Image (spheres, grey):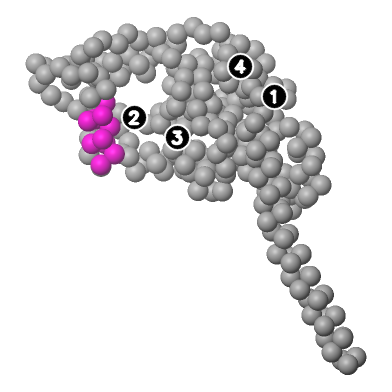
Amino acid sequence: MITIKNSLKSFSIAILAFFLSACSAPCNLQKEKKSFDQISKTKCETFTCISEVDSTLQSDLETQGKRMFQIYLIRHAKPNVKKNWFYSADEAKQYVLDYNSVPIIPFDSSLVAVNLRPNHIIYCSSLPRAQETALKIFGDKFPVVSDSIFREFEIRMISASSFLKMPLGIWQAFSRGSWMLGFNHRGIESHKEAKLRARQASENLIKVAYDEETAVLVAHGMLNGAIAKELEKKGWKLIQKQGHVNLGATILVKTVDIND
């Protein structure tokens, strides 16, 4: 009888230990989900808000042996280039040249609220529209560093008869589509090369985030989208997706063990 009682006691303890261990992983996931939800629900009074990870949240994570990092992917302001209804192939090519060189349309810098630590480095594309946007938002208080690795995916407009005129969007769709299929990249990087550059750009931003806790990039719609995809592959969680909108931000976060 004593043996049976002891066996039952041992069995009960084993069952309890099993449930406690089974609960620990979901509980940790629940805490992590709560942290992500807390960030995504942070109220922003302006069009875009850029800030450090909440100090209270970070302290709570540190008690669990964890730390959170975040990456902001911001799209440049709107370039000051006139659009027509219809374009010939040559006119569409000229539009691309103008788009890459004209200044941005002036905007109210208060549309973007910035709450970062002093001397925080801001990164941007080497193209004028991204550089101007970064300097307008951050130039008075933060160092701005431009790098060609963050430039937009290049586009080469397809050739056609000068008599053929179509909306700019159709020219872009045909040109970009053929480029993505592996054609139409003479003189520019291929789609495969562009994806590789986006992967390298994501790795650079991860290094910055691990050094500064928050990485901020001012770049372009397609590049921001490609970088976000690469980051998600690496375990980063997307909590906001507006990096395809002028002055909008895509935000990704990741929680890691401090000892890793």
Q: Identify residue for label 3.
A: 225
Kind of residue sitting beneath label 4:
Thr
Q: Identify residue for label 1.
A: 116
Q: Identify residue for label 2.
A: 154
Kind of residue sitting beneath label 2:
Glu
How far separated are the C-alphas under marks 2 and 3?
14 Å
- Give 149 or 210, whichever is nearer the viewer: 210
> In the rendered structure, are the residues bearing label 1 and label 3 in contact, judged by CB atoms less than 8 Å apart?
no
How far separated are the C-alphas under marks 4 and 1?
16 Å
At numbered mark 2, what does the secondary structure look like: helix, strand or loop? loop
In this image, 234 relative to 156: left or right?
right
Q: Residue at x 70, y 33 (%)?
A: 53
Within-10-Å neighbours for mark 2: few <14, some 14–19, many 20+: some
How far separated are the C-alphas under marks 4 and 3?
22 Å
Q: Which residue lies furthest to the front in this view?
A: 1
Kind of residue sitting beneath label 1:
Leu
Residue stretch rendered in magenta on the structure: 172-181
